Image: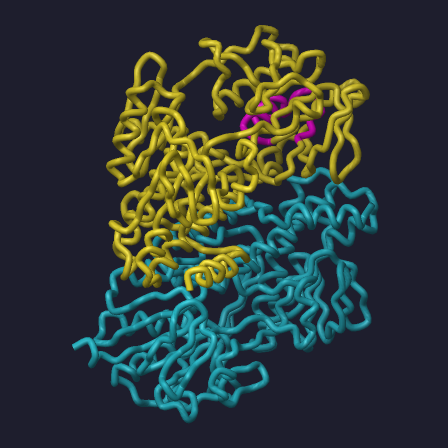
Chain colours: A cyan, B yellow
């Protein structure tokens, strides 16, 4: 009997892969969900880990736990190295090849430095828990070093934080860093004050949140300025060195630089030799199939799917989730219509009490938008416990302006502090 | 006026240093609290981070936040490299030397491999957050690798967990690992079952919890056996290699080994040329002063202080806290009597519902002891928020048998998994 059950392999347990696997759980299919990490990450809140408001476990859930009660879903911790489409197999790094009847590629994206890979070590991006902890470590360490720095010029450099890229992630990071570096310091530190800290958001285009209507960009810019963020638009970054960002005509001396400017899809297109856009996303059919592969789908950040306006749908969780459910339904024989995205609004948040929402026909900004944003994010967090934990933390942060996860950890703590102090000496 | 205020320098923000600084906060002294980490760590619950029940931020609080409202306490992130007692200065790694009128050394201890330093990489100890995350990563990764391992011998090795040292930390670790590796697997994993996992607690002496009365050792051993832990007493470890522990006559093939056998005081005795015991603890005067240094105190794990029975007081939080308050009182001119330790009971816990408590005159074990242990630990956690977060997590874990922080993170994830799989291949 087992032989007649189709084998579905899902690569990647992000929003898309997880939604597909959930839809297939308990059905007459044999599902294997492969991910190189053991946890699903709620990426929209990752910037809160990077800015010490939440702990990693608050926004991540072990994939196995999610499917503990679904005996037809097997979770495999491994990394895909290639696809042998002819023999219907995916190739894995650690275990042997895996047969599939249906394959769903939801392998996501990582940040891209547009060919400047040497920028990576000066300006970490924000995709994984390790990225978030590294950024948290750098931000908190810069404040600590500034507290004891007597050289005024050097202290200014330690207290300058540059975020590159004015999309939702960049806007959220800049707002959260400004709150952390300008609010928290006021009581906890003795030598540095809010005035000392400078947070700069650099965007190459002519406004922040380019995917939103212009009036929301303006609202976001105002909210950021209220938090003390400097905004540089029409300012492409031409070089990032140790402690220096060259943006337009400006040379910004900054110890802490965060990259939120570009992403690149995983190499799924290369595995299949499929046609892709310049961000590496596969041009899929209208039913999300990879062209020339009847039984391989690509979804989420791995796929380029045109929306109503002809532009590719944005790389956000709701798109990936709807696509995951759509391909699961196709595998179950339920759905044969082309995929259409139903938007329930596009959100971005700025600091602790402002957000912008694009509902399509109308827009919203300010505190009410922030409340909606908060409830939506707590609601969509995987797992009941995470919702409680995040809710408690947020309420606490909101009432006290405190950040609960202000820990400097990691083996690199010491070496970084040493190299900085020697340089300064 | 400022010149007449005495300068108190406290090195180390563990339980002792923190208690001293809290007692001195708001008084007519100028306090500098130096620590190489930015957080105070609630070490008694560190084993719960190592076994994925709690997040690091649940048991750690930024030192600065604790003293945000105490303007006379300055917090300095730096590492002490030595003491110049003649000129009343401590020497720091990053910033310049620091003058003191009074010096409190509460520098704690780290684990010691009794001269076998090469054991460290095979058998990490449990002192810092990094240690705990490393142990968590190894335990969770071993389960993941076992799930896909087809070689029976190799799988058994992956599912064997050895804890070396039968003191409170070892007992707590063994119990928690047994729960994690034998309970969680039952629903989340498809190939491995509780029967596969083997947890071995190795103790060189003739019983676990040697610091407790024999009947509590017996209760603890029974509780551990109920959880499925094998106990080897009178079994000194003679060698630890990659994936192998030689304990007494046994050769135990195990991927995951945890060291809980020995600690060594920080080099404070060496800085002062003071007499110390073989664990490096300074033999202090009855008022906790370092001999020949009228204005230097050593407390907590840094000091060897005889108790009522003539043996050194145990390295536990209540001892350090009472000593911290005692030296602070002496500096404030309040207390001149010799230090005496008032014991409110000595506790250790085994798994999710058992504990042992030594009240001195009588003893307690079982579920009631565990409830007392739980409330005591939540109560003594620094900060209101941590209490809520830990309370919520514990209640959740207790009701569901789930572990909320089951994340495999860290750059080392991949290399370890690769090296293991290659070895196995």
Q: Decide if residue B234 is on the left or right side of residue B90.
A: left
Residue displayed at 25% across by 80% down: A6
The percent coordinates of residue B423 (x first, y second) are: 45, 60
Specify the farthest residue to the left: A1
Residues in magenta, as a range: B13-33
Which of the 4 image quadrants contains residue B141?
Answer: bottom left
Which of the 4 image quadrants contains residue B151?
Answer: bottom left
Residue displayed at 74% across by 52% down: A158
Specify the farthest residue to the top: B337
The percent coordinates of residue A155 (x first, y second) are: 78, 48
Front one among A410 and A333: A410
Determine if the magenta segment contains residue B84.
no
Q: How many numbered marks, from 0 up? A: 0
Front one among B298 and A300: B298
Q: Decide if residue A373 is on the left or right side of residue B249.
A: right
Specify the farthest residue to the bottom: A292
Q: Is residue A401 visible?
A: no
């Amino acid at each position: 009997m087992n032989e007649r059950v189709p084998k579905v392999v899902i690569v990647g347990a992000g929003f898309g892969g997880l939604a597909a696997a959930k839809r297939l759980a308990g059905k007459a299919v044999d599902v294997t969900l492969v991910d190189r990490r053991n946890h699903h990450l709620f990426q929209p809140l990752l910037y809160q880990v990077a800015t010490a408001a939440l702990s990693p476990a608050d926004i991540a859930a072990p994939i196995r736990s999610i499917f503990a009660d679904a005996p037809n879903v097997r979770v495999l911790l491994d990394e895909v190295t290639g696809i042998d489409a002819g023999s219907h197999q995916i190739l894995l790094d650690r275990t042997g090849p895996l047969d599939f009847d249906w394959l769903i590629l939801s392998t996501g994206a990582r940040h891209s430095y547009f060919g400047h890979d040497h920028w990576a070590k000066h300006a970490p991006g924000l995709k994984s828990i390790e990225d978030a902890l590294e950024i948290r470590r750098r931000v908190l360490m810069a404040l600590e070093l500034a507290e004891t720095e007597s050289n005024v010029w050097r202290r200014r450099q330690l207290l300058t934080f540059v975020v590159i890229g004015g999309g939702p992630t960049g806007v959220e990071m800049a707002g959260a860093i400004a709150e952390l570096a300008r609010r928290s310091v006021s009581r906890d530190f003795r030598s540095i004050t809010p005035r000392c800290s400078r947070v700069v958001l650099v965007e190459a285009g002519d406004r922040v949140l380019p995917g939103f209507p212009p009036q929301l960009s303006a609202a976001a810019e105002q909210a950021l300025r209220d938090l003390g963020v400097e905004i540089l638009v029409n300012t492409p970054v031409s070089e990032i060195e140790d402690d220096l960002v060259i943006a337009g005509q400006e040379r910004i001396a900054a110890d802490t630089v965060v990259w939120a400017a570009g992403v690149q899809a995983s190499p799924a297109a290369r595995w299949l030799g499929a046609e892709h856009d310049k961000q590496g996303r596969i041009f899929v059919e209208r039913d999300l199939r990879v062209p020339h592969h009847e039984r391989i789908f690509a979804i989420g950040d791995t796929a380029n799917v045109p929306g109503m306006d002809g532009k590719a749908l944005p790389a956000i969780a709701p798109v990936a989730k709807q696509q995951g459910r759509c391909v699961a339904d196709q595998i179950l024989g339920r759905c044969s219509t082309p995929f259409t995205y139903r938007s329930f609004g596009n959100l971005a948040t700025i600091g602790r009490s402002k957000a912008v929402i694009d509902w399509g026909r109308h827009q919203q900004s300010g505190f009410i938008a922030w409340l909606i944003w908060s409830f939506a994010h707590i609601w969509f967090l995987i797992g009941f416990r995470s919702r409680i934990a995040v809710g408690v933390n947020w309420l606490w942060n909101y009432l006290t302006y405190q950040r609960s996860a202000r820990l400097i950890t990691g083996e690199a703590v010491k070496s970084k502090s040493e190299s900085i102090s020697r340089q300064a000496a």
